[in-house]
Amino acid sequence: MATGTTSSRPETTSPGRAAGGSRRSGTPTATAAGRPTRRLVIVESGTKAKKIQAYLGKDYVVEASVGHIRDLPRGAADVPAKYKGESWARLGVDVDNQFTPLYIITPEKKGKVAELRDALKTVDELVLATDPDREGEAIAWHLLDTLKPKIPVRRMVFHEISEPAIRAAMENLRDVDHDMVDAQETRRILDRLYGYEVSPVLWKKVMPKLSAGRVQSVATRIIVQRERERMAFVSASYWDIAALLDAGADATPRQFPARLVAVDGTRVATGRDFGSDGALKASAKGKEAARALDEAGARRLAEALQGRAMAVESVESKPYTRKPYPPFMTSTLQQEAGRKLRFSTDRTMRSAQRLYENGYITYLRTDSTTLSESAIQAARQQARDLYGDAYVPAQPRQYNRKVKNAQEAHEAIRPAGEVFRTPGEVANEVDGDDFRLYELIWQRTVASQMADARGTTVSVRIAGTAATGEEVTFAASGRTITFPGFLKAYVETLDEGSDGQADDAESRLPELTKGQDLVAAALTPEGHTTNPPSRYTEPSLIKSLEELGIGRPSTYSSIIKTIQDRGYVWKKGQALVPSWIAFAVIGLLELHFSRLVDYDFTAAMEDELDSIAAGTQGRTDWLSGFYFGAAQGTEGSVARAGGLKKLVGINLEHIDAREINSVPVFDDVVVRVGRYGPYLERVRDGESQRANLPEDLPPDELTPEVAEQLFSVPQEGRSLGVDPVTGHEIVAKEGRFGPYVTEILPEPAEPPAPADGAKTRKKAPAKAKPRTGSLFKSMSIDSVTLDDALKLLSLPRLVGTDPESGEEITAQNGRYGPYLKKGTDSRSLTGEEQLFTVTLEEALEIYKQPKQRGRRAAAATPPLRELGKDSATGQPMVIKDGRFGPYVTDGETNASLRKGDSVEQLTDERASELLAERRAKAPAPKKKAAPARKAPARKKAPAK
DNA sequence: CAGTGAGCGAGCTTCCGCTTGACTT
């Protein structure tokens, strides 16, 4: 059984509460017995523990906590019995009592905690050496609060794993920083409240099992927003002229490309001059307006320029320098491994984890680009050895690029050790993904300490006059790299769809001087179209999240997994494509929880957490503002998002689910997100038309043409073949009540056109109804055969005639499963197959039994197991099997068995506990308003 | 999003950040 504790740490550090902490020095001292002091050092990672153990020697026991050891309960199953009845048990946070969290030892960590307790018995002092960041501080405190050591406890921090760094850290021990722990706890509670309060709104209004959260919802929104831009994008087409100019036989290269940029002093429009609406942008301030060239114009002009003289109008030359990129941190490693090696973030991290565990690279989850002193030296030495002195700058490079919300607990990701091993040196130990990733990390690290690349860029303008009189200007540009510097070791790859140039790309122009004559060797009119912004890929999404300060190095990969697992996003090649469900969910959040999905929500939260960590802001006030509203006069902007609890209540009541699940796409066409996936809907001639949406159709490809096509295909569903008797096509479809088969009836012959429309309406021939039949539970829509379908459509089956009453007995499949029907008298059958096999004799036998209904049916079924008396009521308890699986009852109260309970092993105590919980929860529901049951929002008046 | 006939015990889903191990075949 999990034992939980609610922590009640005051908001400010109170003296005496910090455990241990009276000693000021960490220097090993001797105990009274003369034996040296033994210390237990706890770090977060096992690999790290091993390394530090080697530095510290035998007077130290170094253990790993392996991450967090406690957390809020994940769900009801994790809540200890003692707290189960509490109104806040679902959240795991006592919101009415200072937001006291309920912490339980994470089930998988019980063994680990026991190990740590044992290790603690063998030492004289405990040193908490978890990571020097907010989470690490919290882990330290959780260890303290869980292990409750009786010996002195100190906190140790280090940013780099090397012997001198560890030794120095040992000399600078401190106490646990409770303000920082408060900040972490506040973050944890906010995330819990956000996630566990908003997700249920989605379950009720969109679909069960969906989720919302501070990080995942913004990540999804970014992707949805991009898709909206793509959908709204109107492509523009424009033309220009590509020229191949000839500088004469002596020039190298003799010919070079140039492009038409102006006609009669007016700039020729390029892609950048068009807006997302396909129109030319109005001239920006201080910038001349551009004029778009159309095809006819471009062809005419190219013709008129044939054989005309051209001359160099200007030559502008500028130095080109590029600085190396900083060493990798998690996000940039994921981005570059994605771009260069095409690894998913997940693949990158799995490989990096192996490299880390086997000692090839430093820690893989970091937001720092800092290299240790020895790593800088190692990189410089390696660069010198490989490329020579000229390639290494006199001064070591320091990278202090601050990432938003960076905690910088670790070094950059780099080859491990004081001397880097070259890829060649590790090649026979490491292969596949790991080798390629190591090589990438090695290159980037070495390059980061190399010299700038230097070169020259040249822009040339060339003038000419067309035979028709227009003055034209062409432009050409060149880049030469005279000294590659770091580019020799490493060049960053461009994002997909980016129109930039790689840093090492060169294009040579001949030596040109002003006034020099040129000849156009070729003049080619070229057509272009503007493109919508490209979709996000895993690397580019992570880059955006990082820029917004959302997510942490340890979670980037899981964010992408989460939004895919929830069905918000799917991958098409490298691209992340949002689902229609994501449109519905994000639409809901934007409309009703707008502050929570603001791109700067996390940034604001981080600022305010900083003030909690600094001790200038109280955690309870702040959380109260967020959850109950800012009535307490709290200042923070997150608090002003305010009153989450009330907002959820209002939204549960007022959000119109039908409206939320309708995504307008164009004209009167909407995509509706139903229980069985999205479909198209529109109204034509007063009738609503529907069409299936193929699963793999990206939203931006749903054009009016595609929609028309989909609407024109009436047979949705999978065709199973043709009924040999009727000749009708049989299809399997997904419907409101689940999968079913039906037949496609041929369109009735067009009735003769009425001479006068007035009176002909009422005599419209009744449309024949197609036969339908639900699939059996044993069948699936993908595998059902024509034979199955024909059998299903043959229902109801006439079983025979009751000799007594003369009534027909039929077997059919209904809402509650297979049953027999005789007039208004019906009886359930036990199996679906019985529909086809039950004989008249058997049916009559079934009808001889009294109708089993309600209480009597329950009473008739024998209990699965009998238990002892309930400790509360004294009534005997039994386990029965019901609609929702096994449950325990005392005749009055019923309670389902939970996850982890088994019929065989349920004890009387547990049974009583379940019953007690159930009683506590049920405040005798009177006539609980019906709408909660069935599609609540449908009842509401349509909003339009 | 098809269309048919009861009468009955719900409980669970979900967040973000730290870490990797692993009950078996």
Image (tube, coloured by chain):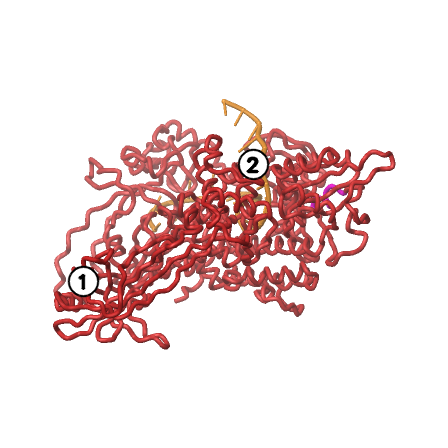
Chain colours: A red, B orange
Q: Which residues are magenta?
A: A142-148
**Residue at the image point whose x is 22% and y is 72% from the top:** A263
Location of residue A821 by image quarter: top left
Instruction: Judge from the rendering whether residue A642 lies leftward or rightward of residue A465; answer left or right.
Output: right
Q: Give the letter of the chain under mark 1.
A: A
Nearer to the camera, A821 or A673: A673
**Residue at the image point whose x is 56% and y is 63% from the top:** A647
The label on residue A525 is 1
Q: Main secondary structure of the magenta part?
A: helix
Secondary structure of residue under mark 1: strand
Nearer to the camera, A717 or A595: A595
Q: Amino acid at mark 2?
A: Gly
Secondary structure of residue under mark 2: loop
Determine whether A716 is above or below A40 in the image: below
Residue A931 image offset from top left, x and y in percent:
49, 56
The label on residue A359 is 2
